[in-house]
Image: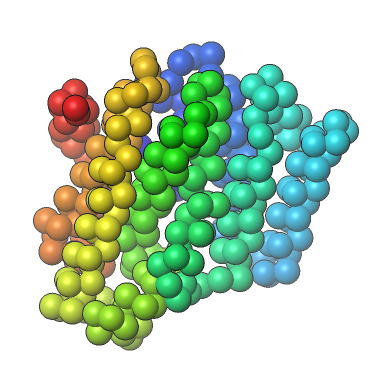
Amino acid sequence: MSINHYENFPVASLLLPARLRPAVKAIYAFARSADDIADEGNASADQRLRELHAYEAALDRIEHKQAAESPLFQTLEQVIIEYRLPLAPFRDLLSAFKQDVVTTRYSQFTDLLDYCRRSANPVGTLMLHLYGAATEQNLSDSDAICSALQLINFWQDVAIDWQKARIYLPLEDLQRFGVSQTQLASGTVDHAWRRLMQFEVQRARSMMTGAQALALRLPGRIGWELRLVIQGGLRILEMLETVDYDMFRHRPKLSKGDWFLLLWRALRMR
C-alpha cells in the first residue's frame, strides 16, 4: 500500500492500468521530492520553505500557461493538461509540507485532521480524477480513507516521529489518557499508553471502515487497488494490537504472508 517512505501512494502497482502509470509516477515524483525538501537533509527551516515556495511558483507557471522550467514540472504539466487535473490538491500537498517544517505538535484532533486533509487526501483526489471517478460521494469517502491511512502511519511511526522531534498524537488525547511527552521519549508502554492507543486505533479503524464502500463502488482495477489499500491499513492496526501497542520496539511491517491475507480479505469484502 506504499512505496519507499512516502506512504499511501500506489505507484505503478500491478493493478494500476499501464496507461496511467506515467501520470501516477509524475504525481509521485512531485510529492516525493517536495516531501524530501521538508524532511530530509540538514537544510535550515528557511531554506526548506524557500524551496517549497519555488514549487508553488512552478505550479503558478502551469496555471498561467507559462513553460515549465524543470524536467519534473515539464512532465507534471503534461499530465495536468492531459487529464485536466485540478491544481488545488498539489497546492494542498505543498501547504502540508511547509507545515511539517514549522509545526511539531497538534493540540486537537481537528488540527490533525486538517493536516491530513492537505497531506493525504489530495492523493486520493488526484487518483479519482485520473480514473474519471471524482464524484462528490467518491471524493468524500476517499478523504476519509486517506485521512485514516495517514493516521495509521502516524500511530505506527510514533517512535520514528519522536526522533524527528514531532508528535502527531493530539496533545488533548495525551492529557486525557494521562500520557506525558516524557513517556514518549522513554518508550514506556503502560496501562495509560495502551488505553490511549486503543482509542486512536479504533478511531482510525472506524474512519476506514465507514468509507470502504468506495472500493466496492469503483469498477475494475481501481476498485481492487483500493481494496488492498484498505485491507493493508486495517492489517497494520491489527498488528499494533497484537504487539499490545508497543510500536517503540515492534513497528508493524507487512510481510509477504500478509499480502496473501490482504488479497483474501479483499476478495471477501462486501
What residue is rendered at 15% in x and 58% in y?
A: 241
Residue 34, position in %: x, y? 63, 49
Q: Is 86 positioned to the left or the right of 163 in the image?
A: right
Q: Is 200 positioned to the left or the right of 48 in the image?
A: left
Q: Is 97 positioned to the left or the right of 248 in the image?
A: right
Splitting the image into 4 quarters, where does residue 84 fall? Answer: top right
Q: Quadrant of the N terminus?
A: top left
Q: Pick the residue in front: 155 or 247.
A: 155
Residue 219 drawn above or below residue 199: above
What residue is rendered at 67% in x and 47% in y?
A: 91
Residue at the extreme front = 136
Q: Quadrant of the C terminus?
A: top left
Residue 138 in sight in this render: yes
Residue 14, position in %: x, y? 38, 20
Splitting the image into 4 quarters, where does residue 83 fall? Answer: top right
What residue is rendered at 51% in x and 59% in y?
A: 115
Residue 17 drawn above or below residue 164: above
Residue 165 in sight in this render: no
Residue 20 drawn above or below residue 135: above
Residue 152, position in %: x, y? 32, 54
> Number of callouts in the render?
0
Colour logic: rainbow
Q: Is 83 positioned to the left or the right of 233 in the image?
A: right
Splitting the image into 4 quarters, where does residue 68 fall? Answer: top right
What residue is rendered at 21% in x and 75% in y?
A: 193
Residue 121 drawn above or below residue 23: below
Residue 42, position in %: x, y? 62, 66
